[in-house]
Image (cartoon, rainbow, N blue to C red):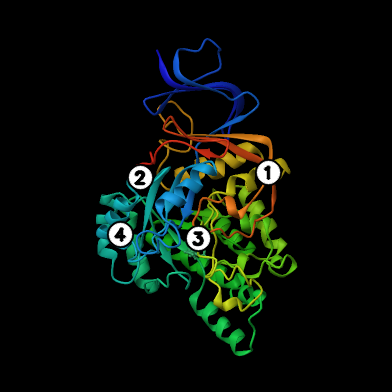
């Protein structure tokens, strides 16, 4: 049997095992994993000696901003960042203009992404007041899941009333698809923001104080209650608090199908860094980055399986919107979020090198976890025979410095600028196509729409 591509001599990593072997890819799929060395003919061979061969890494939380906000990002630039950063599949968020709230909106996004995506992509739809009749048609059209913004954030897309959410989730339960929530309690955060503003506070930490952990916990506990009632699948996006981890842990014990996501900033950074490192508005994000105690609780959740997904919340904005020239200025005027899809893998591999988690656990939360949560498993998230030939090859010894100017995103703003990293992606391979080698991009936008397997 001749194959298209062999990645040979690498150390193959799955959550369950790490071993030397060769990955054979034919017609875009994993044909075989061989440990013997009598390899067949191949059109292309990559020698991965000294490198780690991971299933293609998935970022299930990016905002690529089309249609309507393409001055911040588009599918070309966003997905180039993904490919450069070792990500083979992304899932795109619906807070665009108009929001991805019906089949027409879904089709508009599909049209914008087609021939512009350098990596594979899934699409979320948003549930707002009055669009529950779109849940089944959207599932039919091919969304991988849904999102509800429980708390006010970028895009100002309000959640439906609680009763309507429960009804929506009952409909969703018929689809087998999951709904993720931006979990912040609107009542608490709007009240506190006004109170702090009335006091004249506009320093960076006022943003953190306006969105305390209890506001996340309140939203998570209600969401878990509603998902239990509706028997639907829930994801808590971008978890930031210790209370949240405990609630998700308990929800799972109570039999609710609730999964958790967190991002590198919540694990690595602290809210105080806004002041200590003068990051100010550069580190403004919803929900906010909190204290070290919260970060440690998130790490424990990640290691014990309470949190099964890392998503970057890649949220690009212009330097002006981010107040990049005046990060310690009026925090209320800065927009929340920054581009993260390209910096995530080096940042997390640096944590692996520091001993915070094994490479196998990282594969679990950046490949298997997202693929399972969003019904892309077993086509994505693993290197089993018949899976898509998506591979991220990483060099755990390679060191570098994060440089905002080198980001592929339109948004050259990141709180991680100047961070030293050890452990970097060196190849990104999508269905057998090498799209990145040593940081350089290759070829055409080969990315394809990924519909869920349900
Ligand atoms: C996100 C954005 O910019 O779209 N911003 C953020 O701070 N996380 C919106 C969101 O998910 O809250
Ligand atoms: Zn959000």
Q: Secondary structure at mark 1?
A: strand
The Cα–Cα distance between marks 2 and 1, rounded to whole angstroms, is 36 Å
Q: Dot 1, crowdedness within 10 Å: few (<14), some or many (≥20)?
A: some
In front: mark 4 or mark 2? 2
Q: Nearer the viewer, residue 324 or 23?
A: 324
Residue at the image point whose x is 65% and y is 74% from the top: 204
Q: 53 above or below 213?
A: above
Label 1 vs 3, first from the N-terminus: 3
Instruction: Please name the residue that numbered disc 2 is placed on.
Output: 452
Q: Dot 3, crowdedness within 10 Å: few (<14), some or many (≥20)?
A: many
In front: mark 3 or mark 2? 3
Point out the residue furthest to the top here: 38
Residue 138: x percent and y percent? 28, 55
In front: mark 2 or mark 1? 1
The Cα–Cα distance between marks 4 and 3, rounded to whole angstroms, is 33 Å
Q: Dot 4, crowdedness within 10 Å: few (<14), some or many (≥20)?
A: some
Instruction: Please name the residue that numbered disc 1 is placed on.
Output: 400
Residue 327: x percent and y percent? 64, 71
Q: Nearer the viewer, residue 50 or 81?
A: 81
Instruction: Please name the residue that numbered disc 3 is placed on.
Output: 316
The Cα–Cα distance between marks 1 and 3, rounded to whole angstroms, is 22 Å
| Residue 306 appears anywhere in the view | no
The circle drawn on residue 59 is none
Label 4 vs 3, first from the N-terminus: 4
Label 3 vs 2, first from the N-terminus: 3
Q: Secondary structure at mark 2?
A: loop
Cβ of mark 3 under 8 Å from ligand 1: the answer is yes
């Amino acid at each position: 049997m001749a194959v298209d591509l062999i990645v040979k001599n690498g150390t193959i990593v799955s959550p369950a095992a790490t071993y030397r072997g060769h990955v054979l890819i034919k017609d875009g799929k994993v044909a075989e994993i061989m440990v013997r060395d009598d390899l067949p003919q191949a059109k292309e061979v990559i020698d991965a000696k000294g490198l780690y061969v991971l299933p293609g890494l998935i970022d299930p939380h990016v905002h690529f901003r089309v249609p309507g906000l393409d001055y911040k990002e588009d599918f070309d630039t966003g997905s180039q960042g993904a490919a450069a950063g070792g990500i083979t599949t992304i899932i795109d968020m619906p807070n665009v203009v108009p929001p991805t709230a019906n089949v027409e909106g879904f089709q508009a996004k599909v049209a914008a992404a087609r021939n512009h995506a350098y990596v594979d992509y899934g699409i979320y739809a948003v549930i707002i007041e009055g669009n529950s009749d779109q849940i089944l048609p959207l599932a039919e059209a091919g969304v991988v899941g849904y999102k509800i913004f429980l708390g006010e954030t970028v895009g100002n897309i309000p959640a439906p009333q609680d009763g309507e959410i429960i009804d929506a989730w009952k409909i969703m339960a018929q689809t087998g698809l999951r709904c993720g929530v931006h979990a912040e309690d609107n009542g608490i955060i709007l009240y506190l923001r006004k109170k702090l503003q009335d006091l004249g506070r506009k320093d960076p930490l006022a943003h953190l104080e306006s969105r305390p952990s209890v506001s996340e916990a309140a939203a998570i506990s209600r969401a878990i209650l509603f998902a239990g009632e509706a028997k639907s699948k829930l994801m808590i996006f971008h978890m930031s608090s210790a209370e949240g981890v405990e609630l998700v842990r308990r929800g799972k014990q109570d039999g609710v199908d609730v999964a958790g996501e967190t991002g590198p900033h919540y694990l690595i950074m602290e809210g105080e860094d806004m002041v200590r490192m003068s990051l100010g508005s550069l580190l403004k994000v919803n929900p906010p980055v909190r204290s070290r105690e919260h970060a440690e609780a998130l790490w424990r959740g990640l290691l014990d399986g309470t949190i099964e997904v890392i998503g970057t919340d890649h949220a690009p904005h212009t330097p002006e919107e981010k107040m990049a020239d005046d990060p310690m200025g009026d925090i209320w005027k800065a927009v929340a979020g920054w581009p993260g899809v390209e910096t995530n893998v080096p940042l997390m591999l640096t944590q692996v090198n520091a001993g915070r988690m094994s490479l196998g656990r990282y594969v679990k939360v950046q490949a298997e976890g997202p693929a399972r949560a969003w019904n892309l498993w077993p086509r994505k998230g693993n290197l089993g025979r018949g899976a898509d030939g998506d591979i991220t090859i990483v060099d755990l010894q390679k060191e570098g410095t994060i440089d905002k100017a080198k980001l592929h995103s339109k948004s050259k703003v990141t709180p991680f600028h100047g961070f030293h990293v050890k452990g970097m992606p060196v190849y990104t391979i999508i269905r057998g196509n090498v799209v990145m080698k040593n940081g350089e991009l290759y070829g055409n936008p080969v990315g394809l729409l990924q519909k869920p397997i349900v």
